[in-house]
Image (cartoon, grey):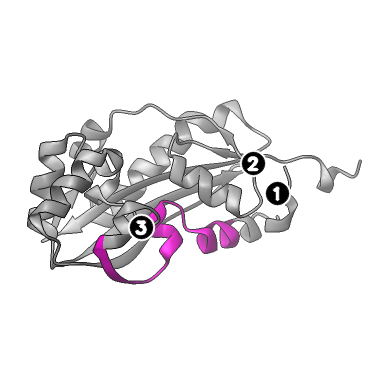
């Protein structure tokens, strides 16, 4: 086998089903190896603006996993919602989700997804910002959505691709980034490493 055609896998340093879905829909069966980092401590110690903080989380995840896969492409991601100049992570509980939605309904916010992609010692680290326009959702729907469990472990307490689609009026930017992983950014990162996206199809 030619050295430039040796098998290269795509390793996702995440347990997110939405990110796996995006890659699967794009023809890739990634190796999943979730990274375990202290996100709160990293956010507290990270300098820079909101985009820098989210990128730092993504890089920390990729750095935790990359040494185990020296010949593969490793992708770390992290998403947070910037609402009223405050970064919002996952709500985790039903009550917190209800409070979040009461605060964000009818407003616009930025969904920030940090990406860190590494291969052969090279890195692409970038944050993609997409504007999300939330619908003016009823109290009953907010409670039903929260109690469904779907948004509890989602950045910004919503999904774009499932039940949450009822409650997002529109977005401005990259929809795949809102779901959790920018496929256009990943393509550009692979090209910068001299790899074609189609090389990973059908893995």
- Neighbor class of circle 3 (other Cα within 10 Å; few <14, some 14-19, many 20+) is some
Q: Secondary structure at mark 2?
A: loop
- Return the x and y of residue 102 as percentages of the image width and height: 8, 54
Disc 3 target residue: 160
| Image vertical order of residue 146 relative to residue 110, above or below | above
Split into 4 quadrants, where in the image is the N terminus?
Answer: top right
Q: Earlier in the sequence, mark 1 or mark 2?
A: 2
**Residue displayed at 52% across by 29% down:** 33
Q: Secondary structure at mark 1?
A: helix
**Residue displayed at 45% across by 36% down:** 14
Q: Earlier in the sequence, mark 2 or mark 3?
A: 2
The label number, if any, that marks residue 200 in the structure image = 1
| Count of marks, rendered view | 3
**Residue displayed at 13% across by 68% down:** 106
Residue 87 visible in image: yes
Q: Quadrant of residue 189?
A: bottom right
* Dot in front, 2 or 3: 3
């Amino acid at each position: 086998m030619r050295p430039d055609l040796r098998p290269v896998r795509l390793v996702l340093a995440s347990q997110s089903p939405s990110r796996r879905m995006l890659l699967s829909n794009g023809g890739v069966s990634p190796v999943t190896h979730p990274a375990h980092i202290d996100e709160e401590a990293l956010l507290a110690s990270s300098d820079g603006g909101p985009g820098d903080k989210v990128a730092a989380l993504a890089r920390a995840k990729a750095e935790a996993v990359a040494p185990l896969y020296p010949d593969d492409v490793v992708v770390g991601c992290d998403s947070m919602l910037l609402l009223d100049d405050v970064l919002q992570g996952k709500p985790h509980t039903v009550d917190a989700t209800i409070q979040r939605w009461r605060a964000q309904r009818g407003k616009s916010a930025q969904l920030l997804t940090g990406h860190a992609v590494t291969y052969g010692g090279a890195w692409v680290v970038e944050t993609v910002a997409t504007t999300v326009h939330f619908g003016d959702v009823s109290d009953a729907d907010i409670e039903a959505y929260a109690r469904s469990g779907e948004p509890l472990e989602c950045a910004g307490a919503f999904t774009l691709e499932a039940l949450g689609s009822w409650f997002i009026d529109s977005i401005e930017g990259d929809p795949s980034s809102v779901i959790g992983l920018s496929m256009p950014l990943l393509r550009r990162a692979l090209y910068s490493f001299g790899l074609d996206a189609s090389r990973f199809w059908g893995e």
